[in-house]
Structures are given as C-alpha cells and as structure tokens.
Image (cartoon, helix red, strand yellow):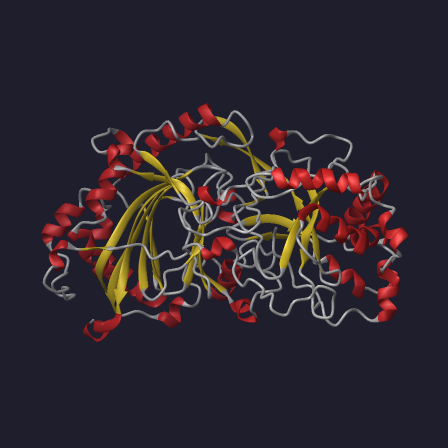
C-alpha cells in the first residue's frame, strides 16, 4: 500500500449530524455486496482458501460488490476526484487523499459521491467486519478508523532512437517490495477496478500483486506475522489504468468493542526490523598501518600524476583546475566533473556498454516489461540484494582480463579508484583525508533495479560516483526532467538516503575521510543550478524536481509518521550521465537512493570514504 495524507483522527468520531448523512442501516450496507458473499458457506470456503494460501495468508474474492455499484463508483471517481502524482524511492502512483475525509464534506459535496459513500460504509460495516473475522480469524476490527484511498497505476509513453533502434518505453507506475504490518493495521485489502471495466486484464499488461516469502528477503531469525510484500509491476499500456481502492482495517480504537489497551501498535514494519543499516565495511589503506597520513604527506606528486594520466582527462590534473575544484567543493560540499576519463577510454566504454545493452534488450525485452533474466547471461556480474533494500548487478573479478568495456570497468574498480594516487587527488580536490574505502561497480537494469532510501549512521562519508550511462540517442529530456527515473537523490532526514546516479553506466566511490567540512552548506542544495537558474529556483526544483509536491520518504508510514519529517529537504539530485564524476560529502543520517529506471540501464563503479573529524583543525 502507498502512503497518503493523514486522515482525520479516529477519535473523537465525526459530529452526529454528519455521521447520519453517511452511515447506512445494516440492510442497506450489505445489499450492495455480491449475492451470497456473506453466507456461512461462502465464509467457510474463503476461510479454507485463506488457511491454505502461501507464502502469506491471503484470500481472493472474485466478486465483492455488484457491478452496478462499482460502475457508479468508477464514474464518481473519474468525474469528481482529484489525483496527485506521488513518487519516492519505493513507488510512483497517482493517488487521492484518504477517503475517511468524505465524512467531513458539506452536504453539497457529499452529494457528488453517493455510490462511493455506500461502498465505504459497506466495507466498514459491522456485517463485513464480521465476515472478515470469519475468513481470517483476525479478531475485532475498528469501524471508526476508516483508512482507504483510490490509487491509479498508469502508463505514460515516450519514443526515442537508442543505439540505432526505434524504441518505445513505458513510464510505468510501480510499488516495490514493502511490508504493510505497521501501526494498528490488522488487515490490508485491494479492491480492483481496472479500466476499461469491460475488458479483462491480461498478465502481460503488468500490474500484478506479488507476494514474497521473508526467506527471499533476508537470512534472519525473524518470525513474520501475517504480512504482504507487495510489488505492483509496471503498467504496460498507456490506455489502461490499474484503478483500485485500497486500505487497511485497524484494530479497535479506544471506546470500541474489542479494544485492548495492552495491544501496542507496531512502530516499525517487519521488514524494517530486519537489518537496515547501510554502514558498509570499509577497507583501510595499506600505507596507514602505523598512523593516518597528514594532508602534506598526501600531496599530489608527479608520480601520482603519471599514474592518473592513464585514466583521467589531463585537464583534471592541472594544478589550476584542481584549485578551482577545491574552492567549489569547499563552498558547496559537492562538485561534478564532466568528461572525466580520457577520450580514448570513454569512447571504448561508451560503445561497449551500448553493445551490452543492445544484446540484453534483444534477448530479454521482447515484452513491455523486462524479464528478470535481463543481463543474467553476461559473465562477470552477480545479482545482489536483499530486494527490500536494493537490487542490481555488481561486477566481480571475473571481468579481469576481458577486452573492451568489461575490462576497463574492472581496471577502474580495482586499479584507479582504490589507488594511493587517486586518494591524493581526492584529498587535493576536497581538502579531506580519505581514511578507508570500499569500491563497487554496479549495473542497474531498466525496469528492474534500484536502491531504497538508506543512511550511514554515526559518521560522515565522501561519495564519489562516475556515471557511465550512454546518451539515449538525441533525446535526453526524459533524463533531465526525471521522468525516466535513474536519478540519484540525497535527502537530509531522520531516514538516510543515497544520492542516485544514472541508469546504464556509472562508477561510484564510497569512502572515509578526515578534514574540514561545511555541514551548514551541505544541508542546503549542493548541486549546481542550471544555466540561467538562480540558486533559490534551483533549490526549489531540486527538492521537488517534478513540481508535484513532496512525497514521503517511507511509503509504509502515513498517519504514524512524526511531524519532524515534514521538514526533510533534498540536498542533491543527479540525473544519469556519461563520463561524469560526482563527488559529494554526505553527513551522518542523510538519506540516499537510486530511483528505479524505466528507460535505459545504468552502470557505475564507486568508492566510499569515512570522515574523521578529530583532526579537523589540522587542515
């Protein structure tokens, strides 16, 4: 399920004058259900289905309401309800506000939704709650706390020429792995009303609900309660909508029958109880066995420049250029370097990566939704997870000795990024002393891979990312506007977020460092304003790149979220690009993620370094 604006509080209940306008009598609230649904034989049959279901207890009711009621509900929704597009690391969806707020409308406004009100009252009626108890054995349910909204998973479309092929990509709404067990929720539900109503939905159109056993998400000793890991696969047709009404039944509230004051709400979902730390173990530099070096010892020398000249554009080895970059980094705590690699290396990488993407597209993109086997036949890459936090392909040492792009990526990962020379170059550009590092090369497949919001706790990190995503023909508008996904975002929040890079190819650096930093600068927008754009305008577009209002970082939390999270701000958003190095200082607790891409794939290699503030005065 997806988060939405907080509904009015469950207690106190709406004024009696308004309640009379929306609450139906028992015989009225049940007559809209499909004939025989509430009969004992129906309850027994569904209970047996529920008990035998895997991997989590669930039931499918083929016919819930009468077709006449649902057609009227559909018309009221499309004619009178406003949808807002919401997008975070975990989902993209068009959603209404909480339908519990219908009780607070004026009589004139309520007159626009007679069928929707009937449906809502029928769902939360005593008769249907008793029916759910019989099917699931879940115990008492609240009729007062009504928690539901309308969701529309749609498909936009764009067309462009990529690598000499005319390609049509679908900009699908989606919802990645998540867990609904949180707060006082007891039963979750989805009422499907796919459009058009008279056309059966086909599996190849996507939109499937997928349930994953906890053993596929993490190797832990957590014994799960009844839960749903829900994934809404990309919608595959621009003329269709996966329209649904979804929500939760909650435990009884104070004053309701069955209320138990000792029944403590869950503050975290079961998935969040699994290890969520993104503190990646870092490897110390071998030369620091006795003591960490001073900035003077790390000064960039001629031997370092000779080594780096095998990889870097000569411009970035020029003392004057390094001085300019250092001043910019000191001011903004981030810097972007275009055309970073030598032209010869960049050209070979670009052509090789395009060939790899073309090969994967021909083998695994015959359908609108890419196969999960996409890229699996390419040696030297292994799939990593767990999927409730991340999913992508990571380079292995099997790339060693390969020709072309694969061999270059291996050299960047194993020779350039962890080298003492590159460490000295980073120290010169950032005025920080890298202490330890970890390096990875990652491939994000289109429509499949992502990283969800996570943070490094307790220490500052220096993120270094080399984007290797080839140009998508002559059309980059989708990347620049963020509609194709694949962007790397960092947020200052109580939840930690990784800045995201671009889809097909990228090289990322993560590491530890010590030195002077400007946290007060880093907590503002750190990316560069576009040409002709003021810093204030840029900060606004970065915090809300699509101009559609702020979406919460954690889609699991709605009314249970703290007010403090409303102050979260975007620090840096980086769209996919080729041969571009991004260096950013990330404070402890800053969230970072890579948004799922719907266009091309993404490749990257990276290094992470920690920041030791104990010798800040030495720099």
Residue drawn 88% across the image and 62% down it: 21
Instruction: Name the spot of residue 575 as percent of width and height, x first.
Output: 44, 49
Q: Which residue is drawn at 82% across and 44% down?
A: 33
Q: Can residue 219 be seen in this view?
A: yes
Q: In this view, does 202 lie to the left or right of 510?
A: right
Pinpoint residue 14: horizontal percent, then vertical percent: 79, 69
Q: Residue at x 26, y 60 (%)?
A: 512
Left or right: where does residue 241 sit relative to residue 439? right
Query: In front here: 511 or 162?
Result: 511
- Residue at image coords 25%, 33%: 398
Relative horizontal placement of residue 386, taking residue 466 as reference (left or right): right
- In this picture, is 492 found above or below 579? below
- How far across and down, in percent of the image, does residue 400 sit? 22, 33
> In the rendering, at what x and y percent does residue 474 appear?
47, 36
Q: How many labels does the image show?
A: 0
Q: Nearer the viewer, residue 115 or 577?
A: 115
């Amino acid at each position: 399920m997806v988060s939405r604006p907080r509904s009015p509080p469950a207690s106190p209940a709406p004024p009696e004058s308004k309640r009379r306008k929306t609450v139906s009598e028992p015989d009225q609230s049940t007559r809209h259900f499909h004939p025989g649904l509430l009969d004992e034989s129906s309850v027994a049959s569904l209970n047996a289905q529920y008990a035998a279901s895997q991997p989590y207890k669930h039931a499918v009711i083929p016919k819930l309401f009468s077709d006449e009621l649902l057609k009227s509900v559909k018309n009221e929704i499309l004619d009178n309800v406003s949808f807002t597009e919401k997008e975070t690391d975990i989902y993209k969806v068009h959603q209404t506000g909480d339908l519990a707020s219908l009780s607070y409308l004026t009589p004139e406004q309520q007159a626009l939704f007679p069928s929707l009100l009937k449906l809502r009252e029928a769902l939360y009626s005593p008769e249907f709650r008793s029916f759910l108890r019989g099917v699931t054995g879940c115990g008492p349910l609240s009729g007062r706390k009504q928690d539901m909204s309308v969701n529309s998973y749609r498909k936009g479309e764009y067309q462009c020429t990529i690598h000499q092929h005319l390609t049509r990509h679908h900009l699908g709404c989606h919802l990645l792995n998540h867990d609904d067990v949180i707060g006082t929720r007891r039963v979750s539900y989805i009422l499907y009303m796919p459009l058009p109503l008279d056309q059966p939905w086909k599996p190849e159109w996507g939109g499937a609900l997928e349930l994953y056993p906890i053993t596929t998400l993490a190797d832990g000793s957590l014994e799960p309660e009844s839960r749903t890991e829900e994934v809404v696969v990309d919608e595959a047709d621009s003329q269709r909508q996966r329209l649904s009404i979804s929500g939760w039944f909650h435990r009884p509230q104070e004053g309701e029958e069955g209320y138990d004051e000792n029944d403590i709400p869950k503050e975290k979902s079961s998935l969040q109880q699994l290890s969520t730390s993104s503190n990646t173990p870092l490897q110390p530099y071998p030369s620091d066995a006795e003591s960490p070096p001073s900035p003077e010892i790390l000064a960039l020398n001629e031997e370092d420049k000779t080594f780096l000249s095998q990889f870097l554009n000569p411009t970035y080895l020029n003392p004057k250029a390094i001085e300019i970059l250092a001043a910019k980094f000191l001011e903004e705590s981030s810097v972007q370097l275009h055309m970073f690699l030598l032209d010869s290396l960049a050209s070979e990488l670009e052509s090789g990566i395009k060939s790899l993407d073309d090969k994967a597209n021909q083998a695994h993109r015959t359908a609108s939704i890419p196969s999960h086997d996409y890229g699996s036949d390419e040696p030297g890459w292994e799939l990593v997870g767990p999927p409730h936090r991340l999913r992508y392909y990571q380079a292995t040492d099997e790339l060693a000795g390969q020709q072309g792009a694969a061999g270059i990526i291996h050299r960047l990962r194993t020779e350039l990024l962890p080298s003492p020379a590159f460490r000295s170059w980073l120290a010169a550009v950032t005025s920080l002393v890298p202490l330890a590092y970890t390096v990875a090369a990652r491939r994000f497949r289109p429509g499949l891979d992502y990283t969800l919001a996570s943070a490094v706790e307790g220490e500052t990190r220096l993120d270094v990312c080399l984007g290797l995503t080839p140009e998508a023909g002559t059309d980059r508008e989708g990347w620049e506007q963020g509609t194709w996904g694949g962007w790397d975002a960092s947020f200052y929040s109580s939840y930690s977020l990784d800045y995201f890079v671009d889809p097909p190819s990228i090289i990322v650096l993560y590491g530890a460092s010590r030195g002077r930093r400007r946290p007060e600068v880093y907590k503002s927008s750190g990316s560069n304003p576009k040409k002709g754009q003021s810093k204030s305008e840029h900060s606004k577009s970065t915090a809300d790149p699509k101009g559609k209002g702020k979406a919460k970082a954690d889609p699991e939390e709605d009314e249970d979220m703290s007010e403090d999270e409303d102050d979260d701000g975007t620090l840096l958003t980086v769209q996919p690009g080729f041969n571009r190095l991004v260096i950013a200082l990330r404070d402890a607790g800053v969230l970072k993620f890579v948004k799922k891409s719907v266009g091309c794939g993404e490749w990257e290699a990276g290094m992470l370094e920690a920041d030791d503030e104990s010798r800040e005065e030495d720099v």
